[in-house]
Amino acid sequence: MTVADMDRSVDFYTRVLTFEKRSDVELAGDDIEHLYGVFGARVRMVRLQLGEEQIELTEFLAPRGRPIPADSRSNDRWFQHIAIVVSDMDRAYQILRRNKVEFASSGPQRLPDWNPNAGGIKAFYFKDPDGHPVEIIYFPADKGLAKWHQETDKTFLGIDHTAIVVADTDASLRLYRDTLGFKIAGESDNYGTEQEHLNLIHGAHLRITSLRAAEGPGVEFLQYLSPSDGRMAPVDEHANDIVYRATVIETDDASTTVPALREARAGFISPGVVLFQQSSVGYQAGILVRDPDGHAIEVVSAR
């Protein structure tokens, strides 16, 4: 996620959501410019970990980008959040209230039992200091990965998935499943007052498709069957704009994915595979592309 003030963001994620800092580096050079498609880029990048999962926060020291549109909604095509699993929804919600987070839901929602794939799940959307939406989610005993049900005294446990709004689930599957190798892990048809108040979208009716790779957080497609007035992602979005988020996918050799991504007509942000000259990046090589809805995907190979 691109952030405007790194110290503010690190304080929020570590103090409120109990992430732990893993690295903090400043990067510049041709490789960084080429990856992000931003000339003159100098960034401060911080990796934070919660449980077994990590997020990367990136502040562009130069050049600065634009803030998130103030009127962003949950069905706009640029919507993306991380879903943080909690052991106790009431306790997690009170922590967020004490820290005066901005609401993106009307309050925590318990999805109804008539929905076999989602019944009993509790969820709440809020915004981080930059306006990035974040979800906290509680899984009942019969749902979610086994690791979310282990005994613990922690409130915030880890990241289950990142969710993205898509216009056409089948078109997105052709990239994420058929090209990148994700597998469908679950599907759900969500509607009703609980879903409407979770998304703060009147009449919200969603086709939800969950995908997973061999390990790590999943990717969840949110296709709004109604209302259909969600806006397309801005065509001039750049990585230094605060609205920018990317899903990082690790593979053995990022360069081998280039032909498949080109055949799938992914939109390339980087000119192709970028070899990182600086070991502090943490990766050997990377590619940055956009999916059919404009969501950024960073395919990397580790050192």
Image (tube, rainbow, N blue to C red):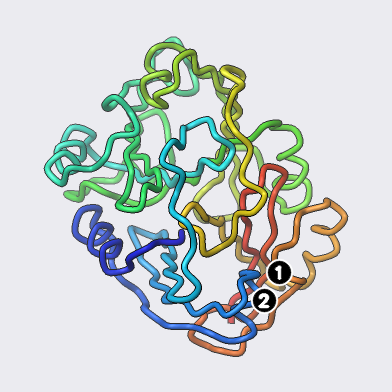
Residue 123 at what x, y percent from top left?
34, 31
What residue appears at the point 37 percent right and 77 percent down from the top-left corner?
Answer: 23
What residue appears at the point 28 percent right and 27 percent down from the top-left corner?
Answer: 108
In the rendered structure, which amino acid carries the disc numbered 2?
His
What residue appears at the point 27 percent right and 69 percent down from the top-left corner?
Answer: 7
Res 127 label: none
Q: Earlier in the sequence, mark 1 or mark 2?
A: 2
Query: Distance of mark 1 from mark 2, alpha carbons?
Result: 6 Å
Res 34 label: 2
Is residue 178 toward the left or the right of residue 81 in the image?
right
Is residue 167 toward the left or the right of residue 17 in the image?
right
Question: Quadrant location of residue 135?
Answer: top left
Position of residue 53 relative to residue 302, above or below, is above
Residue 38 at what x, y percent from top left?
61, 71
Is residue 206 toward the left or the right of residue 145 in the image?
right
Is residue 217 toward the left or the right of residue 293 in the image?
left
In the rendered structure, which amino acid carries the disc numbered 1?
Ser
- Secondary-structure class at tag 1: loop
Q: How many marks?
A: 2
The quadrant of the rendering that contains the C terminus is bottom right
Position of residue 116 relative to residue 172, above or below, is above
Q: Residue furthest left?
A: 98
For the residue pair 279 and 291, the one nearer the viewer reads as 291
Mark 1–mark 2 contact, CB under 8 Å?
Answer: yes
Residue 76 at what x, y percent from top left?
55, 34
- Which residue has dot 1 on it? 270
What residue appears at the point 58 percent right and 29 percent down from the top-left corner?
Answer: 230
